[in-house]
């Protein structure tokens, strides 16, 4: 059997799948690209070709830049906290103590919840009238009167980040815990005999085995955080006063709330491009980290 | 003053008694090998000396200081592991100097010590490499170097050569012997390889199920094994064991008509287990020797290992290849009187009255 026939047959076998993929991914994608060069509206107007107008307007407008920095803030702070919290939790759960297995299982729970459930839960906790947070803080005497945590621009973002961290640090912890278990026992013993402090042991013994997996966690989490939508949509819809409006929310508002399909499509493509670049950069980093650890 | 004293060391993991009362006193400069099969507690004992595990009861003294509860870094010991345990991100030079770096030894002094150790181990050309770029033998040298630079009171080795191939293992064995003779340091060395034990040790502790069966010089372990376990554990092929009964003039071996003349000093009629090393046997035409029926002959090169029976009991003899014994042959075997080891079949204890 010739190899060309093998190749042909492989393509033939993949054809049905390929057709489905083109129909559900390729076509909408192409349609989005086309729309992004028009002034189409969601209903009614099919739109005229306007060239790069949409892109120019978006990139020069203050809306986009403000939203980009909000998104970056959310992504950097929440992922940063998740990484630190995750590693600390993993270090703790890697110790020998009674009830460790139970605690490990419990830790996974927040991550196992669907985002919508998590977001709804936190919205209840933050509720200005009967929320648990208000109750707890006033009963502890830390708070004079009930506050609307999600209703004030200052606290809304912090509240969102807290909710996101609570849900997502277990993933980092899980990855870190698995990595910690790959640290050879002899190496830890050697560092004890050599007199390394806990900090140096972390740096020279544990970190080399943690760095690669953590990089993967960082990539996954940053990309997710950058395109965050559901948790914010459920909790604040981007408010108050757009203080928690991220790029995905902006895309949604542009295309569906304001019905501007054309510029919504351009915005979506810009976000996609940014996430892709982020992924590529991280991919290179991961490969580099993996290369140096081997 | 003894360099290391272990007194009634016991270690339990839950219900399991891993060590059951270990007593050892080591003079400075001794090379003690802990020898035993897998799971007998060698590593556990070594870890207790290092401070990586604490004994359930008993005392560990390094010099004249009790170190129970003292952190490993404060015990003045260095340890070499089977897996080498090198720091993956650090160069060879930093790996070797790590213990000094952690103890804040000035860089210049540290570098000098690293160079000296590297020279001693002939790895000076590797100092800038990372562990991943080294062969197994080179890694083991680095691990040894890391222990050397610290100039500790006691070196601890946990099966340092078992990840190396046979040829390299032999080279490193000689290397360790050379280093020990040169540096005259105190060493505790764990292995389950009896050749390593015999060649390196000034004393061997044969361990079994958490107790020391015999603690003695290598030649004593080989020539006067204290128990059946030690007798069969040390030596390859292992010592032959035959059931016999004492007679006034010697031994009556089960299945053999002619008794064997041997002065044993035991009461007559007592059942014993007779042990004879294969290499102690030779061909002879003496009346009182063992009538042997050969069944299998294997030439190993320097020796002809013949397996057969004596009075129906299995016996292996290592003979000179020139002896030309072949399967089916009947031969008479002989061994010197001191090569006959007598053990109590019930307790396994040695019965010979040695001097
Ligand atoms: N941390 C531990 N917890 C529970 N049991 C242990 C622990 N460490 C060792 N043991 C048990 O103690 C016994 C002796 O183990 P040890 O590692 O000392 O054996 P060893 O003689 O070094 O064997 P090997 O030649 O295989 O290395 C084993 O049965 C082992 O299962
Ligand atoms: Mg061991």
Image (spheres, coloured by chain):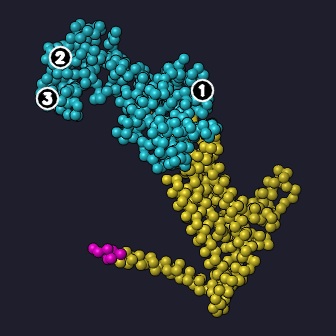
Chain colours: A yellow, B cyan
In the rendered image, residues at marks 2 and 1 fall on the same chain: yes
Percent coordinates x, y for residue B101 in the rendering: 61, 40
Residue A4 within the magenta-colored segment of the rendering:
yes
What number is the disc on residue B289? 2
Q: Are marks 3 and 1 on the same chain?
A: yes
Residue A92 drawn at (x, y percent): 63, 46
Disc 2 residue lies near ligand 1 with CB under 8 A: no
Provide the major secondary structure of the magenta segment: helix
- Say which residue appears at 50% left-offset and 20% top-offset: B27
| Residue found at the very far left of the displayed protein | B329
Query: Is the residue A63 above or below the residue A221 in the image?
Result: below
Q: Nearest the camera: A178 or A294?
A: A294
Element on which disc 3 rests: loop
Left or right for B9, reference A255: left
| Marks 3, 1: nearer the viewer | 3
Task: Give the residue number, with chain letter if any, for mark 1.
Answer: B68
Residue shown at the point (70%, 69%) measured from the top left: A71
Precedes in sequence: disc 2 or disc 1: 1
**How far apart, in angstroms, are the residues tagged by discs 2 and 1?**
55 Å
Q: Which residue is mark 3?
A: B324
Residue at position x 45%, y 47% in the image: B134
Residue neighbourhood size for the residue with mark 3, other residues' Cα within 10 Å, grouped as few (<14), some (14–19), many (≥20): few
| Secondary structure found at label 2 | loop
Q: Chain of mark 1?
A: B
In magenta stretch: residue A294? no
**Residue A75 place in picture, x, y as percent:** 68, 64
Q: Is residue B303 visible?
A: yes
């Amino acid at each position: 059997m010739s190899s060309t026939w093998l190749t042909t047959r492989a393509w033939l076998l993949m054809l049905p799948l390929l057709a489905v993929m083109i129909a559900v991914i390729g076509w909408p994608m192409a349609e989005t690209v086309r729309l992004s060069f028009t002034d189409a509206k969601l209903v009614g107007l099919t739109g005229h070709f306007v060239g790069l107008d949409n892109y120019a307007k978006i990139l020069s407008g203050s809306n986009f830049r403000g939203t980009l920095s909000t998104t970056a803030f959310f992504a950097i702070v929440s992922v940063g906290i998740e990484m630190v919290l995750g590693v600390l939790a993993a270090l703790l759960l890697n110790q020998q103590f009674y009830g460790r297995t139970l605690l490990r299982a419990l830790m996974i729970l927040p991550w196992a919840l669907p985002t919508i459930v998590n977001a709804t839960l936190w919205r209840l906790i933050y509720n200005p009238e009967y929320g648990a947070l208000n109750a707890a803080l006033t009963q502890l005497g830390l708070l004079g009167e009930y506050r609307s945590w999600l209703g004030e621009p200052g606290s809304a973002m912090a509240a969102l980040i807290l909710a996101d961290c609570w849900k997502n640090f277990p993933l980092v912890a899980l990855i870190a815990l698995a990595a910690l278990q790959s640290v050879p026992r002899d190496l830890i013993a050697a560092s004890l005999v050599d007199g390394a402090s806990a900090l140096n042991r972390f740096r020279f013994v544990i970190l080399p085995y943690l760095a690669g997996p953590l990089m993967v966690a960082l990539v996954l989490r940053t990309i997710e955080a950058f395109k965050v939508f559901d948790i914010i949509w459920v909790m604040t819809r981007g408010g108050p006063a757009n203080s928690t409006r991220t790029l995905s929310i902006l895309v949604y508002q542009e295309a569906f709330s304001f019905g501007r399909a054309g510029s919504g499509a351009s915005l979506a493509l810009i976000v996609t491009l940014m996430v892709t670049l982020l992924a590529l950069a991280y991919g290179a980093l991961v490969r580099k980290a993996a290369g140096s650890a081997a | 003053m003894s360099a290391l004293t272990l007194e009634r060391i016991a270690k339990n993991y839950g219900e399991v008694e891993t060590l059951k009362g270990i007593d050892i006193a080591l003079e400075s400069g001794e090379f003690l090998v802990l020898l035993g099969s897998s799971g007998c507690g060698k590593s556990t004992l070594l870890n207790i000396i290092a401070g990586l595990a604490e004994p359930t009861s008993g005392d560990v003294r390094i010099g004249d200081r009790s170190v129970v509860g003292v952190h490993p870094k404060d015990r003045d010991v260095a340890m070499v592991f089977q897996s080498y345990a090198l720091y993956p991100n650090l160069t060879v030079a930093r790996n070797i100097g790590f213990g000094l770096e952690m103890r804040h030894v000035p860089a210049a002094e540290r570098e000098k010590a690293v160079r000296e150790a590297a020279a001693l181990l002939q790895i000076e050309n590797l100092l800038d490499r990372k562990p991943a770029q080294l062969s197994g033998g080179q890694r083991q040298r680095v691990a040894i170097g890391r222990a050397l630079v610290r100039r500790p009171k006691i070196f601890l080795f946990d099966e340092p050569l078992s990840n190396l191939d046979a040829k390299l293992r032999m080279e490193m064995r000689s290397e360790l012997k050379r280093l020990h003779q040169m540096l005259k340091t105190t060493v505790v060395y764990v292995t389950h390889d009896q050749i390593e034990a015999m060649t390196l040790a000034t004393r061997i502790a044969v361990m079994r199920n958490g107790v020391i069966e015999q603690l003695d010089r290598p030649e004593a372990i080989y020539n006067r094994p204290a128990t059946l376990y030690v007798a069969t554990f040390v030596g390859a092929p292992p010592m032959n064991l035959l059931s016999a009964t004492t007679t006034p003039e010697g031994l009556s071996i089960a299945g053999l008509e002619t008794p064997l003349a041997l002065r044993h000093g035991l009461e007559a009629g007592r059942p014993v287990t007779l042990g004879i090393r294969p290499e102690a046997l030779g061909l002879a035409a003496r009346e009182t020797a063992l009538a042997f029926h050969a069944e299998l002959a294997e030439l190993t090169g320097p020796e002809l290992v013949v397996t057969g029976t004596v009075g129906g009991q299995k016996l292996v003899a290592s003979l000179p290849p020139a002896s030309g014994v072949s399967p089916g042959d009947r031969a008479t075997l002989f061994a010197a009187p001191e090569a006959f080891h007598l053990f109590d079949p019930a307790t396994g204890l040695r019965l010979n009255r040695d001097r």
